[in-house]
Amino acid sequence: MLRHDLGPAFPLGKVTLRPSAIQSLSRTDIVEAILCHMRCPCLGDPDEEGQTYFPFLLEGLSLAGFYKVSSGREVLVYTEADRSHTTVIPADEV
């Protein structure tokens, strides 16, 4: 459950999945990772991982985060600096 849900912290642009994400991740894994990424963990509890997001948001830089989803898998979600494109990649591919 997301506490302090303020909605999306930034636009995702076009969301694409690497072929390996389509093959190895469930739809739930993908949606959960994208939701966590776009809501920016740093806007929740100060103790949560993701504190490095804030300068990237303010300066308009690329954003990348690894998220452990409820299935136990880790997923990398990467958003381009211009916010035109977001890619979902299984962490074991990185």
Image (tube, rainbow, N blue to C red):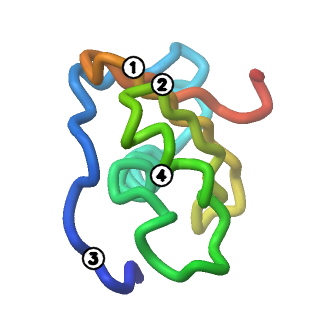
Residue position marked by numbered label 1 in the rendering? 81
- Mark identifier at residue 5: 3
SS for dot 2: loop
Where is residue 79, by image quadrant?
top left
Q: Amino acid at mark 2?
A: Ser
* 9 relative position to 86: left or right: left
C-alpha distance separating marks 1 and 4 = 13 Å
Residue position marked by numbered label 4 in the rendering? 54
The residue depicted at 56 percent of the width and 39 percent of the height is 25
Q: Amino acid at mark 3?
A: Asp
* 20 relative position to 4: left or right: right
Q: Amino acid at mark 4?
A: Phe
SS for dot 3: loop
Q: Earlier in the sequence, mark 2 or mark 3?
A: 3
Frontmost of labels 2 and 3 is: 2
Residue position marked by numbered label 2 in the rendering? 62
> Would you call the spot at circle 3 few (<14 residues within 10 Å), some (14-19), or many (20 or more)?
few
